[in-house]
Amino acid sequence: MTLTRRQFIKSSLAVAPAAALMPSVFTRAVAAAINQQASVGNRTLVIVQMAGGNDGLNTIVPANDDHYYEVRPSVNVLPGDVLAIDREVGFNPGLTAFKELFDEGVLAAVEGVGYPGPSYSHFQSMDIWQTADPQKSGGFEGWAGKYLEGLPIGADDEVQSLAVGRSLPRALFTHKATVPMVNAIAAYQLQRAPRAVADQDERTQALLSLYGTGAATRPFGEHLDATLRAADSSSRAVQGAHGRYASTVEYPDTKLGKSMKVVAEAVTGDLGLSVAHVRIGGFDTHATQLPVHGDLLRDTADAMLAFYRDMQAHGRDQDVVLMTWSEFGRRVTENGSGGTDHGSAGPMFVLGTPVAGGLYGERPSLTDLVKDNFKYTTDFRQVYATMVEGWLGAPADAVLGGQFEQIPLLRREAVAS
């Protein structure tokens, strides 16, 4: 179902007073306090972070622009290597998987994405992208976390969100919703005592009962209890999905490939997954960029292609959309170390059967620059708004704190109404 603005805001405020008084260690433990309501549906958004600052100019390459080769005499992609999109630009040769998906009409590329007054600090810019707040107002929640806080929790929605990795991305920070973090499937469970395997269920129930002291120690006891029970419930759900999962698709033997497979298990396991976040690092290419960047792009595209083929094989490709982001692009001119330095705007990619593939946004000028940096042409919150409201069916202004023009990235029949 689609969330109305009133339903979303009402659900978002359900436990706000209690959450505001809680220290951050408890703020992800309140999902059990939300009233049980109907699920938002079976649509999933998978967020793929290209961490470090992806060089957009060498990702979608202006191979027929002589000025590109003038400003990048050595850190360039040769015209014969570019995978042509049209007469002006093409994909980096590492993106053969993206070219395949683009030609199928299920991959969209949005060019020139950024925000006003860009920061060139990794940490500050990542915070801006993850909170959807270029004003840096200091709010705790991430943009996806705000969306999760507005979701009603259904009885069958065991894992509404999922972060694959060792740390929780700020995009998923939330005062209320439980966000499981899975680095390895085998490790995401209450660890069994080697000498008491037969009694594991009884020991788990005893542990849950031990922490079931919420009534006597409000408010924190209730939240500790909810945290433990949510961890137990989500770990059982993830383990169950892992046990049921079978696929003929071979994922790349890379960190991102493994992460995408974890998400695939959650989707095909019908756990109620609404938002997932995965990450690939290494895009801070200050030196020796060409071979490193090409490999990173290949790893990204190949893992996303495998995931998409897996969704097709399971008949779930209509239910899932993937979206990439990176905290900034790189400068137009190469540096003296065979690389590029922190820049501003760059491309975002959106993938899925519901996606109307093609090129979107306005390509930034290579000559009309600000201190050797692109002028952004598309606000990243426009892409977020399209995903939040157009795909997930939630009011984008409640999540993003303002109105942003959506981009027609989704096929008409896929847009939430």
Image (spheres, rainbow, N blue to C red):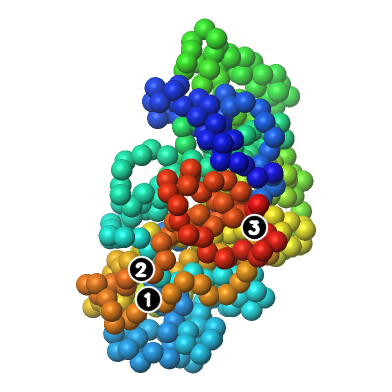
273 or 186: nearer the viewer = 273
Residue at 56% from the left image edge and 36% from the top image edge = 6
Residue at 55% from the left image edge and 55% from the top image edge = 387
Q: For residue 104, which quarter of the picture?
A: bottom right
Distance (Cα) linking label 1 and label 3: 28 Å
Image height check: is 248 above or below 105? above
Secondary structure state at the residue bearing disc 3: loop
60 or 409: nearer the viewer = 409
Quadrant in which the N terminus is drawn? top right
How busy is the neighbourhood of tag 2: few (under 14 within 10 Å), some, or many (20 plus)? many
Image height check: is 335 above or below 135? below
Marks 1/3 in contact by CB < 8 Å: the verdict is no
Give the labeled residue for mark 2: 376
* Disc on res. 364: 1
Distance (Cα) linking label 2 and label 1: 7 Å
Image height check: is 2 above or below 340? above
Q: Is residue 412 left or right of residue 228?
A: right
288 or 320: nearer the viewer = 320
Place of residue 79 in the rendered image (x, y in percent of width and height, measured from the top left): 45, 91
Give the labeled residue for mark 3: 415
Marks 2/1 in contact by CB < 8 Å: the verdict is yes
Residue type for callout 3: Val
Residue type for callout 2: Tyr
Q: For residue 235, which quarter of the picture?
A: top right
Inspect this view and state whether residue 252 appears.
no
Q: Is residue 281 left or right of residue 333?
A: right
Place of residue 325 in the rendered image (x, y in percent of width and height, measured from the top left): 46, 60
Q: Earlier in the sequence, mark 2 or mark 1?
A: 1
Q: Earlier in the sequence, mark 1 or mark 3?
A: 1
